[in-house]
Amino acid sequence: MTDPRQRVKEFLTWQNATSPFFLPKELLVRKSTPTVAPTAQFTPPMQGGDPEAAMALLARDTAGCMKCRLSETRTKLVFGVGDVRARLLFIGEGPGEDEDLQGIPFIGRAGQLLTKIIENGLKIPRDSVYIANIVKCRPPKNRAPFKDEADACIGYLKNQIAIVRPEAIVLLGKTALEHLLGHDKMTIRDAREKNFEFEGIRVFVTYHPSALLRSPDLKRPTWDDMKKVMAYLGLPVEG
Ligand code: SF4
């Protein structure tokens, strides 16, 4: 059988003839069953190693959550979206107005930019990665979530990570860095240079897409970070 990476090279030679061009799906999803075991921190609701069933169960358990004050002002809870066998998982801060209305993460202006980075830059269909946030309900006026809100919600995200069991996680911005890894004093500029792990999974840190909308000069370093992620996953990227 042809080596998948050889197939990628062949695809890349005629990518201009295809629109849109994406990497082959088999390079983007993990093949093995997740091996994560329950820990003191969290207990993934594994369903006999079936991540689709486990995620559906977790989504059902999360629906209607009233564990923090954000439940009082949300329109829709924004659980997360993507392939539950993805090799790559993105984590942002929390839903904004568009996400709150539709119940889907990263669909507003910042989300559209993230989608462009994933699809136009990395050549990966957005639905082949997994995308979630630190909190699942919109903080009023798009403020950052308070610590007690993030603490109330983070267990859901940790369970999602345990179910997807990606090979790499990308933290988008300071809120994700603070609440997943506990680094509340570190700047994104410093965090980008460090090698983090969460439960044995390599974690990369880069700027939140909303920061790129405010400061376009951050696009270049963000793209450099994404190239590091792709290199770590052994996937080709151009530019
Ligand atoms: S933000 Fe999280 S913990 Fe708070 S109500 Fe929403 S789902 Fe529950």
Image (tube, rainbow, N blue to C red):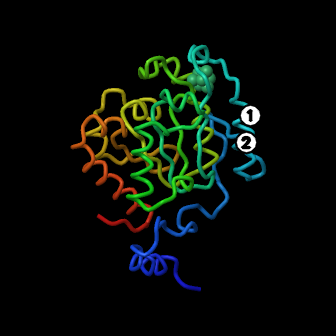
Describe residue 122's horizontal placement relative to residue 185 as left or right: right
Image quarter of residue 68? top right
Circle on res. 100 = none
- Where in the figure is residue 163, as x and y percent of width and height? 64, 46
- Where in the figure is residue 221, as x and y percent of width and height? 26, 49
Q: Residues within 10 Å of mark 2 (few under 14, many from 20)?
A: few
Image quarter of residue 216? top left
On the image, numbered disc 2 is attached to which residue? 56
Quadrant assignment for the C terminus: bottom left
- Where in the figure is residue 171, as x and y percent of width and height? 42, 41
Spatial distance from mark 2 to mark 1, Cα to Cα? 6 Å
On the image, numbered disc 1 is attached to which residue? 60
Image quarter of residue 15? bottom left
Q: Nearer the viewer, residue 113 or 183?
A: 113
Q: Amino acid at mark 1?
A: Arg
Residue at left offset 53%, top offset 32%: 99
Placement of 220 over or under 124, stated as above or below: above
Q: Residue furthest bottom?
A: 1
Q: Nearer the viewer, residue 185 or 140?
A: 140
Is the residue at mark 2 in contact range of ligand 1, meaning its CB lies under 8 Å from it? Answer: no
Q: Amino acid at mark 2?
A: Ala
Q: Residue furthest right?
A: 48
Residue at left offset 41%, top offset 79%: 14
Quadrant assignment for the N terminus: bottom right
User: How many labels sit on residues?
Assistant: 2
Q: Quadrant of ligand 1?
A: top right
- Where in the figure is residue 156, as x and y percent of width and height? 62, 33
Residue at left offset 53%, top offset 69%: 24
Residue at left offset 40%, top offset 58%: 120
Placement of 14 over or under 74, stated as above or below: below
Describe residue 138's horizontal placement relative to residue 235 as left or right: right
Describe residue 225's horizontal placement relative to residue 75 as left or right: left
